[in-house]
Structures are given as C-alpha cells and as structure tokens.
Image (tube, helix red, strand yellow):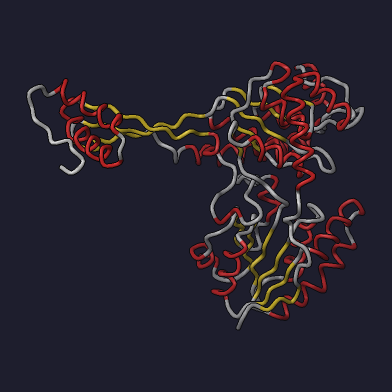
Amino acid sequence: MPREYLKKATLTSKSDASETKKIVREILDDIEAGGDAKALEYAAKFDQYDGEIILSPEAIEAAAALVPDKLRRDIQFAHDNVRRFAQAQLSTVADFEIEVVPGLIAGQKAIPVSGAGCYVPGGRYSHIASAIMTVTTAKVAGCKNIVACSPPRPGVGVAPAIIYAAHVCGADKILAMGGVQGVAAMTFGLFGLPKANILVGPGNQFVAEAKRMLFGRVGIDMIAGPTDSLILADASADPMIVATDLVGQAEHGYNSPVWLVTDDRPLAEEVMRLVPLLIDDLPEVNRDNATAAWRDYAEVILCADREEMAACSDDYAPEHLTVQADDLEWWLDRLSCYGSLFLGEETTVAFGDKASGTNHVLPTSGAASYTGGLSVHKYMKIVTWQRATREGAKPVAEATARIARLEGMEGHARTADIRLQKYFPGENFDLSADG
C-alpha cells in the first residue's frame, strides 16, 4: 500500500531567509571593516553586555566555583565519553604511502587545522553539551588554537556551566560574545584571537547564515537548519516511550520537525493521542515550542511493512533516527541515511545529545543523505604527497605529456618533456598527442 499520512505537516522548516541574509551580510561587512570596536558595538546592541570579552583565568575560575559538584561530575562524565569516542574515530585516520609504480611513491597525511572556532548557544537554553561536543573533538583532533564562543546574558555573562565545560574540555580562549558578532570575531581574529580555520557548533538562524556566508574563506561543520528527528516503530514499541521521545525533540524549537513512521495503526493512533497530553504537561517555556512543532511540522506515516518504513526513513534522511522495533540488526544493516542512529528503547536521542559519547552536531534538513555529523575528521585535512626516482618518473612523464597535449595544455606537457630530456638524454620519446 502507499504511505498513509495520519498526520501531515502544514509547514516545512525551509522558509524564506532573505531578510536574515540581508541582516547577516550587513553585520559581517561592518565588523570586518570596523574590527574590535564594531564587534563590541554589536555586542552591546544584541547581547546587552559590556563585561569582559575574552575571559581571564580568574573569570574562568570564578565561574567554575559556581558550578555544583554534581554538575561538575556530569560534565566530566560526558566529556570522558565524547573524548573516548573521538579518540577511537581518530584511530581510523592513518597516514600511509604506496609505491604506485616502481620508483613512484605517493602518500596520504592527515593534518589537523590550526584554529577551531566553537560556537556554543546560550540563549533560551544553555547548551552545556555543545561545549563538550565541539571543544573535545577539536582537542582530540590536535587543533592548536581552540576558541569557545558563547552569548553572554545581559548583566550576567556566559553561563558558568558553559565556561566550566569549555575549559575542562580544552578551550584555549573563551569569548563572551554571541550571534553573528561572535562568529565574525573568531573568523577575523578579533580581540587578539588567532583566526579560525573552521567554525563548528549549532546556533540560531543568524549564526547558521553567518557560517554559510563565511564558508570558503573558512571551513564549517555543516549548514544547519532546525533540528529534526524520526522514529521508526513497530507493534512491539511502547507508545508512551515513543510519544515521550517525540515530545522531547519537539521542544527544541517551534519549527523542529518530528516524524513517526510505523506499520502499526493502533500504535500510531495511541501515540497521536498521547503527544498533546505530554506537551500540556511540560513547563511553559518548553510547551510553546513543542506545541507549535507538533501542530505545524510533525508527521505520522503509516507504511505497509518494515522495508517501506526503511525506505521512507531514507527519503527523509533525518538528523536523529530512532528504531524501536524488533530485529535491530536488520535495521542497522538496512538504513543508510541519518545523522545518528539510536537502536532500541534502551537508548534515545537525548543520550546522544548530552552524554553517551557520539556527537550531537549533526546534519539537518535532509543533509544526512550526503554527509555525517561533527567528528575529529571534520578538523583534519587529508592531504597527499609524492616523490619519485628518475626511472619512476619516466612512464608518468610520457603519459602526462601525451594527455596534456591531447587536452591542448602545451605548458603542462613541456614540464614533462624537460624532465625526460634532462634525465634520459639521447632517448627518443613519442610525446605527440596522437602517438
């Protein structure tokens, strides 16, 4: 049977961003031209903060003293898990060399970028976990200069737990500045900071747009949209847990899509009954987002069987993908498009978001069809090198000269010719394009 939408989204997360682009372009241009002073001007306007911009060791120590011991232990636990997973990822990147033909050796070398700019949201929610995810992976990758940037609250500053997490995870500098101005400061090397080679971390639409505009002059982890989550569930799933997980992700934002894909109509109907009740039970600050996300962006899709469910999921390519169904190994082997996969009721997206070790900076808006999330690999440049003996260069030079002439690139061909003439004087080579 065709997919049946028991609930269909009335809006999509891809909206007209023309006004955002205009605002971000103006701010970036102003700050690049005006430097520190202009960045401070925007900080005063948007952050409503006039305190210390680059936090001193004393300020970091004072913030750390405000973090309760239990939270310190939780931050350390999460940091250890993320670090261990990142170290395992790093071990999969290896330098190597190979003798391509006799006398010609080529190789690969992984080199970490020097400067990483890690943006840590701190508006409605203090994203402690984002500091852990971005700074830890940069540190494990071997970045020499790591800047953590987070928006300060008016008259207060950056949340102490964010400061503590960034410091524990290895940030070299902590920048108390939010939004486009914070991203610009890291990119342009303001306030004595080293220029970032890569910008990572989640943020609002202005931060995301700034990263998109700056991509090319710096690297970025990805162009992010609103967070999204999909649950695959069959008749064996617990509808209360499914509903709770959907609500847990809907609270991210008013435009955060959540999707349920199932082959069991009674489960779908029970989840649809439960979700509004669970949303109503949230604190008000969370309730508004979840209400709008469920009302406008959520979908519940009924499929014929698990193969159709898997195909539907791959079409959506969700940022977070949860499987609450029998035969988890089948799903692990079959599914191919997701940012991070959560197999079984015993794990959930929130575990990955906060403390289990896998990274929570993930591709959104279908980007999981072509890329994965943040990892140590994002901070690594995979470069190549080669060297050759004169005998090893001989067949390569002959082929290069002929191919280059066929392409009409005579200058290229002559760089091969001159080597053949020098290394093998007196030998005749047929280096014409039609030879």
Kindly give the residue lying farthest to the bottom in the view shown: 1
Q: Nearer the viewer, residue 264 or 431?
A: 431
Residue 159: % across, % down = 82, 32
Residue 255: % across, % down = 78, 56
Residue 50: % across, % down = 88, 22
Q: Nearer the viewer, residue 261 or 5?
A: 5
At a point 12% along the width and 33% down the height, the residue shown is 429
Give the image quarter of residue 97. top left
Give the image quarter of residue 414. top left
188 is higher (above) or lower (below) than 261: above
At a point 86% along the width and 32% down the height, the residue shown is 46
* Quadrant into which the N terminus falls: bottom right
Q: How many marks?
A: 0
Residue 202: % across, % down = 70, 42
329 is higher (above) or lower (below) than 154: below
At a point 55% along the width and 32% down the height, the residue shown is 140
* Quadrant into which the C terminus falls: top left
At a point 55% along the width and 34% down the height, the residue shown is 379
403 is higher (above) or lower (below) than 257: above
Q: Is residue 339 left or right of residue 417?
A: right
Q: Nearer the viewer, residue 99 or 169?
A: 99
Q: Is residue 400 left or right of residue 331?
A: left
Q: Is residue 261 left or right of residue 248?
A: left
